């Protein structure tokens, strides 16, 4: 049982650290030109450019919340919908 709590603590720590990285790197995410790497695309967008559509890790489209930036590692961006049922991988192309 102690191992389970230890792994849970580590997982929560990783998620918190990554959200801080997304917050700090918000400008570089906004300035990027993101291309989908798979057939599964966020709201059918092959390419994403965030200007004012990204507020910390929440993506809005036409004033409505539509997605969450879950993971940002250099040139890779993992996005999910709000219900966390679909996941999308994008790569920085510019």
Image (cartoon, grey):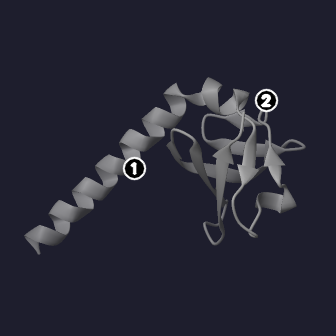
Q: Is residue 25 left or right of residue 64?
A: left
Q: Are marks 1 and 2 in contact (CB under 8 Å)?
A: no
Note whether 9 is above or below 25 in the view shown. Answer: below
Whole-percent x, y for residue 35 in the image: 75, 49
Q: How many numbered discs sit on the rendered protein?
A: 2
Q: Is residue 15 left or right of residue 7?
A: right
Crowding at mark 1 (Cα within 10 Å: few <14, some 14-19, many 20+): some
What residue appears at the point 11 percent right and 75 percent down from the top-left corner? 1
- Looking at the rendered image, the quarter that the C terminus falls into is top right
What residue appears at the point 65 percent right and 48 percent down from the top-left corner? 91
State the SS at label 1: helix
Q: Earlier in the sequence, mark 1 or mark 2?
A: 1
Q: Residue furthest bottom?
A: 1
Q: Is residue 43 left or right of residue 9?
A: right
Crowding at mark 2 (Cα within 10 Å: few <14, some 14-19, many 20+): few
The foreground one among 8 and 94 is 94
Residue matched to label 1: 15
Q: Residue furthest right?
A: 62
Whole-percent x, y for residue 63 in the image: 86, 41
Residue matched to label 2: 52
The foreground one among 66 and 75 is 75
Instruction: Identify the image quadrant of residue 62.
Output: top right
């Amino acid at each position: 049982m102690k191992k389970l709590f230890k792994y849970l603590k580590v997982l929560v720590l990783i998620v918190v650290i990554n959200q801080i990285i997304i917050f700090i790197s918000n400008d570089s995410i906004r300035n990027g030109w993101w291309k989908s790497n798979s057939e599964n695309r966020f709201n059918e967008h092959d390419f994403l450019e965030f200007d004012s559509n990204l507020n910390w890790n929440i993506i809005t489209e036409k004033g409505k919340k539509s997605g969450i930036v879950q993971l940002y590692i250099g040139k890779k961006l993992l996005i999910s919908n709000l219900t966390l049922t679909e996941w999308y991988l994008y790569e920085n192309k510019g």
